[in-house]
Image: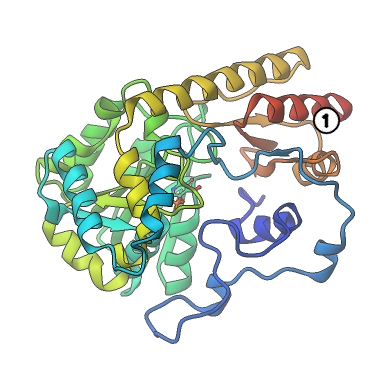
Amino acid sequence: MRSTMSRRNWLKTSALLTGGASLLPGAFTTASANPLMLSSDTNTFHFREEEFALDVPKLKARLFANENPFGPSEKAKKAIQEALSTSYQYPFMMLRELGQKIADYEGVKAEQIMLSSGSSPILHGAALLFSRNGGNVISADPTYDDLLEKAEAIGAQVIKVPLTKEYKLDLDEMEKRVNDKTSLVYICNPNNPTATVVDTARLKAFCERVSQKTTIFIDEAYIDYLDNPRESSMMETMKKGKNIIIARTFSKLYGFAGLRVGYAVTSEDLVKKLSPYTVSWAGISATSGSAALVSYNDKEFLADALKKTIASKEYLYSVLKKEGYEYIPSSANFVMFPVNMDAERFTDEMMKRGVGVRPWQFAGKQWCRVSIGRMDEMQAFAEAFKQIS
Ligand SMILES: Cc1ncc(COP(=O)(O)O)c(C=O)c1O
């Protein structure tokens, strides 16, 4: 049985939600002439005419891309407006300041930070760097498949290890699968699409052992949703000189998905090795950079966005429970629950009612992944859900 719906296929079916092909992370419309860059097939999302023609009402709830509708902050919006008048200038100084700010907070050198337009280019760069000579990439199933799809397209073998019974990463099994051809291990923690986290001590021990054999890529896109992001992060383990790349993004709790700011923290050596394969800071606009600069570690805004996310999530849990549904307890801004019909049909039915969610198939079940939105969006979800559950 197919364990996940590929990102590309899903985007095909969900194009009508956005009314356009290139609104989602990673969507490009042209292929690069650079032979090291990805093929047009991997880099382009194709849409069938009839998909645009489907009669779908205007979306009442956009709950399919794990965005944060409580952001960006007012400070960020103001900074964007102020940056406009000087935006004829390249944002060298501003981005240098942003990199330094992140480095200071994390207790690393500025040379250990790679800024990027969202974390996607870092994932793509890592796929290029670590798959260009073949080998294998080890990961979980299901997980965020962007890096893995690129790695496979470039020529690596992708080894996917099913999640445990609790829908968490099976670190023991992943470690067993590492061999002398393994060029990268991709860990997404909290994991997308299940929103589960692995025990921090176990992950640290795993990283200490496995990073002696190969590079580990830790995707911490959703780390800000945890109660204790600093303690749960693998940053300290990386700082001990381990062979680890940590990817972070402003797209989630900071509410920057459309602004495109992310970064990697790793060794100076790995920053140098990754550099030829990413556009790095050159992809960040002055407006987005200035917004990131005022938003980084804005504790008040982050706490407020988290509080609103938790309130919407609690409401969603109560709706699911009331309708007799189970769900995977979530450590992020999305919730996965099994549905009692074909997942794609479920998604289509929700979409007809103006609610965008995402279908999944794994562990022999059909699932819906619903992102956490504003309360009015969760209510729209509840209304549509009650009609078809
Ligand atoms: C786990 C994970 N990593 C990375 C990304 C890429 O996000 P961005 O490029 O917006 O930083 C996403 C986006 O949904 C994600 O879920």
Residue 319 sits above or below residue 61 on the image = above
Question: Where does residue 135 sit, x and y in percent of width and height?
Answer: 33, 67
Placement of the C terminus among the 4 image quadrants: top right
Disc 1 element: helix
Q: Quadrant of residue 345?
A: top right
Would you say residue 253 is visible in this rendering?
Answer: no
Foreground of the two, 214 or 21 = 21
* Amino acid found under the numbered disc labelled 1: Ala
Question: Where does residue 318 sit, x and y in percent of width and height?
Answer: 68, 14
**In the drawing, does residue 182 fall left or right of residue 239?**
right
Which residue is found at the position 25% from the left and 28% from the top?
230
Q: Quadrant of residue 44?
A: bottom right
Which residue is found at the position 74% from the left and 24% from the top?
379
**In the drawing, does residue 155 fall left or right of residue 355?**
left
Would you say residue 316 is visible in this rendering?
Answer: yes
Q: Residues within 10 Å of mark 1 (few under 14, many from 20)?
A: some
Which residue is found at the position 75% from the left and 41% from the top?
343
Q: Quadrant of residue 84?
A: bottom left
Foreground of the two, 43 or 118 = 118
Residue 320 sits above or below residue 244 on the image = above
- Which residue matches tag 1? 384
**In the drawing, does residue 154 fall left or right of residue 203?**
right
Which residue is found at the position 10% from the left and 49% from the top?
109
